[in-house]
Image (cartoon, rainbow, N blue to C red):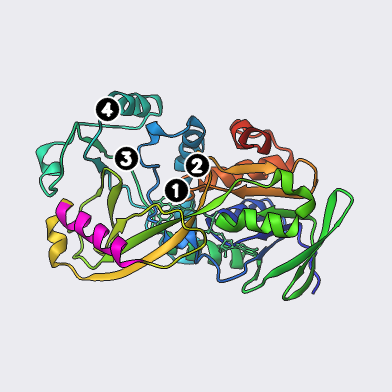
Amino acid sequence: MSSNSDITIIGAGISGLLTALEFSRAGASVSIVEKNRIGRESSWAGGGILLPLYPWRQDPAITTLLVQSLELYPDLAAELQENTGIDPELVTSGLLITQNPDYDAAVDWCEDNHFTCQNPGPAILAPFNGDFLQPLWLPESAHARNPRLLKALQKELQNRQVRFLEDCSITGLEQRGSRIRSLQTSAGKLPVQQLVLTAGAWSAEFWRNLLPQSVNACPDIFPVKGQMLLFEGEQGLLPHMVLDDDGYLIPRKDGRILVGSTVEHCGFDKQTTEAARARLEKFAIRLFPPLANCPLIAHWAGLRPGTEHGIPYIDRHPAIENLSINAGHFRNGLAMGPASAQLLFDLITGHPPSIDPAPFRFDTLH
Ligand SMILES: Cc1cc2nc3c(=O)[nH]c(=O)nc-3n(C[C@H](O)[C@H](O)[C@H](O)COP(=O)(O)OP(=O)(O)OC[C@H]3O[C@@H](n4cnc5c(N)ncnc54)[C@H](O)[C@@H]3O)c2cc1C
């Protein structure tokens, strides 16, 4: 198999697809190697909230990527819908946060980042059976329907002649000096110019297996399982997102309601469990009693690419000159996705980055 692609990307989740879009827009030829199916791992499994949970409790580097991504999302969603006919369902529904013991920090964060936050009126609180503690209403908070966003991205990239190698495993790589020359894959040998690792929770595993001589620089990325439930609801039943302690509900345009999520450290195990189902279901019905009358139609799990502080690695490899990484977005890969891809594009092409790359570098994160 031959390929003269300028950019070869490993992993077709949100990070890989958005990175591919950046390069394709700039006129580069792109190939994406995906070991399973396109967009079916963490990026598919998530909730699609475009805001970290309690962003004021997170590292400021996360806010930087978030703020820039939120500026990019409306145009991205509109462009995808127009070009592909697939609606990523970017909806600014607003988010109610029922308990805010760190209310002042929340208000300060919102002010600093020009994010409207208000005291919710009785109409916003009424449908919920929460233990309210200084509740907050963020009317500008949005969510996307991640499976549709991924499908739209895939179609857009296919229209742009991006080459997808699906169900393709990488068994080795050929390195000469400080450059990777080619990948050995189940579809044959694939020559590479620039290689970008966007393998989510599997990024460190790839690194350890295929870059053993560079193991000291291995990113500290580990799988963190999250389980979700989906209820069938009538359109408009849940008017907006609600976050109650560590659980949340998200409405879809068609009335379906997502309930999330667990945070479990159990390696690459992606099984759902009865205990998690029972806990999430009880949480959801207590918080929003009408769910008791809605059928529970799905239960799944995904593996987040965990990092210690939730800060992704977005950097060029310190020694291998044509290898870069955009991975480790933990709980916020959708929320930070567009800006992460843009930053990596700037680093590879030598454009001055619009945000400070320092927090996302190998030497900062190690
Ligand atoms: C339950 C849950 C809820 C979430 N909710 C939200 C939310 O509301 N908002 C938000 O912003 N984020 C959320 N997230 C987090 C978000 O989903 C992740 O941060 C994001 O999807 C990571 O994207 P990714 O592309 O890096 O990884 P993935 O989507 O996992 O994609 C990585 C891809 O790489 C492929 N791959 C791996 N190894 C190889 C290899 N060797 N060769 C080829 N391909 C390979 C995989 O098969 C996969 O397709 C949630 C996650 C979960 C699990």
How far apart, in angstroms, are the residues tagged by discs 1 and 2? 7 Å
In the image, the segment drawn in magenta is 273-286
Note whether 210 is above or below 50 in the view shown: below
Q: Is residue 288 magenta?
A: no
Mark 1 vs ligand 1: CB below 8 Å: yes
Q: Earlier in the sequence, mark 1 or mark 2?
A: 2
Q: Quadrant of residue 123?
A: top left
Kindly identify which residue carries mark 4: 103
Please, what secondary structure does the residue beneath circle 1 have? loop
User: Which residue type does callout 4 highlight?
Assistant: Tyr
**Residue at image point 79% right, 60% down:** 192
For this view, does 246 lie left or right of residue 354?
Answer: left
User: Which residue type does callout 1 highlight?
Assistant: Arg
Q: Are there few (<14), some (14-19), or many (20+) residues within 10 Å of tag 3?
A: few
User: Which residue type does callout 3 highlight?
Assistant: Glu
Q: Are there few (<14), some (14-19), or many (20+) residues within 10 Å of tag 4?
A: some
Kindly identify which residue carries mark 3: 140
Query: Mark 4 near mark 2, Cβ–Cβ under 8 Å?
Result: no
Please, what secondary structure does the residue beneath circle 4 have? helix
At which x and y percent is residue 248?
A: 28, 50
Q: Earlier in the sequence, mark 1 or mark 4?
A: 4
Q: Earlier in the sequence, mark 3 or mark 1?
A: 3
Q: Which mark is residue 310?
A: 2
At which x and y percent is residue 80?
A: 49, 58
How far apart, in angstroms, are the residues tagged by discs 2 and 3? 23 Å
Query: Mark 4 near mark 3, Cβ–Cβ under 8 Å?
Result: no
Mark 2 vs ligand 1: CB below 8 Å: no
User: Which residue type does callout 2 highlight?
Assistant: Gly
Residue 240 can be seen in this image = yes
Q: Earlier in the sequence, mark 2 or mark 3?
A: 3
